[in-house]
Image (cartoon, rainbow, N blue to C red):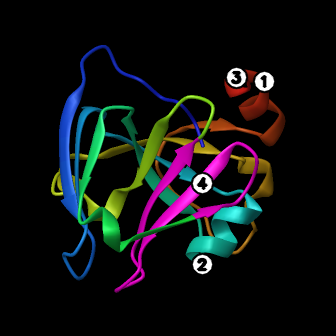
């Protein structure tokens, strides 16, 4: 997952399918990305569409969030009740990549990046004009 940033932060709000978990970010962006890595595809059933929400993220209904440590650098969160995917959390930076579909601002999003593009299976393709990063490029750009 990338650590995209913008010159000015956007306030993001959203909630899971059942409404038991709410999210607010004061450090987000309206730029969406697709991650094609094998873990994201296994987790979400396809590419993980997310938005960089930054580090200033708060949740309501935290008792309804289940966290899964999927790697030494990442943790995935979902609602215990409805199963909605909530976020990918980058442990080294404390940044949240929230699921694009949760956001109240979803209609304002622009998909401008695809990561792990070399891991994307052939059966789907997005028509958006995006920056496309391979696995090697992602790690070179975002590794600590």
* Residue 25 image position (x, y, % from top left): 24, 40
Q: Which type of secondary structure does the marked residue at label 3 adopt? A: helix
Q: Is residue 44 magenta?
A: no
Q: Which residue is mark 4?
A: 75
Q: What residue did someone put label 2 on? A: 45
- For image coordinates 46% across by 46% down, the residue present is 97
Marks 1/4 in contact by CB < 8 Å: the verdict is no
**Other residues around mark 3 within 10 Å, as few (<14) / some (14–19) / many (≥20):** few
Q: CA distance from mark 4 to mark 2?
A: 17 Å
Are the residues tagged 3 and 1 within 8 Å (C-beta)?
Answer: yes
Q: Is residue 6 above or below residue 92?
A: above
The residue sitting at the front extreme is 63
| Residue at disc 2, secondary structure | loop
Badge 4 crowding class, 10 Å Cα cut-off, few under 14, some 14 to 19, many 20 or more, is some
- Report the number of discs: 4
Q: CA distance from mark 3 to mark 4?
A: 20 Å
Which of labels 4 and 2 is toward the front? Answer: 4
Q: Is residue 68 left or right of residue 120?
A: left
Q: CA distance from mark 2 to mark 1?
A: 26 Å
Task: Pick whichever, 131 or 9, lies toward us.
Answer: 9
Residue carrying label 1: 140
């Amino acid at each position: 997952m990338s650590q995209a940033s913008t010159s000015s932060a956007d306030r993001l709000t959203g909630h899971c399918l059942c409404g038991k978990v709410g999210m607010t970010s004061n450090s987000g962006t309206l730029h969406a990305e697709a991650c094609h890595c094998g873990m994201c595809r296994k987790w979400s059933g396809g590419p993980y569409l997310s938005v960089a929400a930054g580090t200033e993220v708060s949740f309501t209904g935290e008792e309804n969030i289940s966290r899964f440590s999927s790697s030494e650098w990442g943790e995935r969160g979902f609602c215990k009740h409805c199963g909605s995917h909530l976020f990918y959390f980058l442990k080294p930076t404390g940044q949240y990549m929230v699921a694009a579909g949760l956001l109240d601002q979803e209609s304002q999003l622009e998909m401008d990046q695809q990561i792990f593009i070399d891991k994307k299976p052939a059966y789907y393709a997005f028509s958006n004009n995006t920056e496309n990063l391979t696995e090697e490029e992602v790690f070179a750009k975002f590794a600590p």
